[in-house]
Image (cartoon, rainbow, N blue to C red):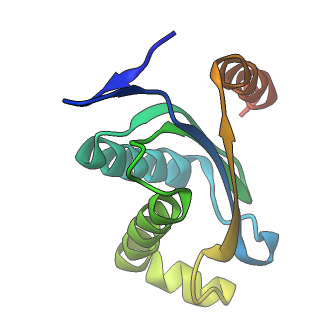
Amino acid sequence: MLKTKSCRAAFQYNVHFVFSVRRRNEFLDPIVRQKLIQTWLSVCQKKSWIAWDIEVVWEHAHLLLGIAPGETPEKAALALLNKAELWFHHRYSAAMKQEGLGTVFQAGYYAGTCGVATTAQIKSYLATQFDAD
């Protein structure tokens, strides 16, 4: 069991996020997926979050992250979605306009906390679901 440590505490705070593309548009092709994952990994590195797993499919993304207790799932989701939207607008604004997307991701998202056993189960599930991609 891996726990993150700060100067005053040891903790394990894992959150499973699901972000959906607006109108479930199949906008996230394999090249875009890899670049998006790298963008999110840079956010995780900057924030000192653990990226247990990030899976991006055609119209949604799953992120399983270990975040600090001082972070709320809302703040983490906003940091990830804002960085992604800025990245998309910088690199793919013409494609977004062609698809009629003012933003790529829906404003709403799923966030659920998970413990050690659930983390392993989610990672296993995600690995079996997206091997074909």
Kindly indicate the quadrant of the structure image that contains residue 79: bottom left
Q: What residue do we see at 71% from left, 23% from top?
A: 127
Task: Note whether 67 is above or below 118 in the view shown.
Answer: below
Classify the position of the C terminus by image quarter.
Answer: top right
Q: Is residue 21 found left or right of 94 in the rendered image? A: right
Where is residue 68 shown, x and y percent of the image?
39, 42
User: Which is nearer the eye, 7 or 129?
Assistant: 7
What residue do we see at 55% from left, 79% from top? 95
**Residue 7 point in image, percent of width and height:** 19, 30
Q: Nearer the viewer, residue 58 or 60?
A: 60
Q: Residue 32, percent across and down?
A: 52, 55
Count of numbered circles in the view? 0
Q: Residue furthest left?
A: 7
Residue at 51% x, 38% y is 65
Nearer the observer, 94 or 52: 52
Residue at (57% x, 82% y) in the render? 103
User: Vertically, is 121 above or below 1?
Assistant: below
- Up-down: is 112 above or below 64? below
**Residue farthest along the front direction in this orientation:** 8
Q: For this view, does 11 lie left or right of residue 112?
A: left
91, above or below 71, in the image: below
Q: In this view, does 64 lie to the left or right of 71?
A: right
Give the percent coordinates (x, y) of residue 110.
72, 58
Quadrant of residue 113 within the rendered picture: top right
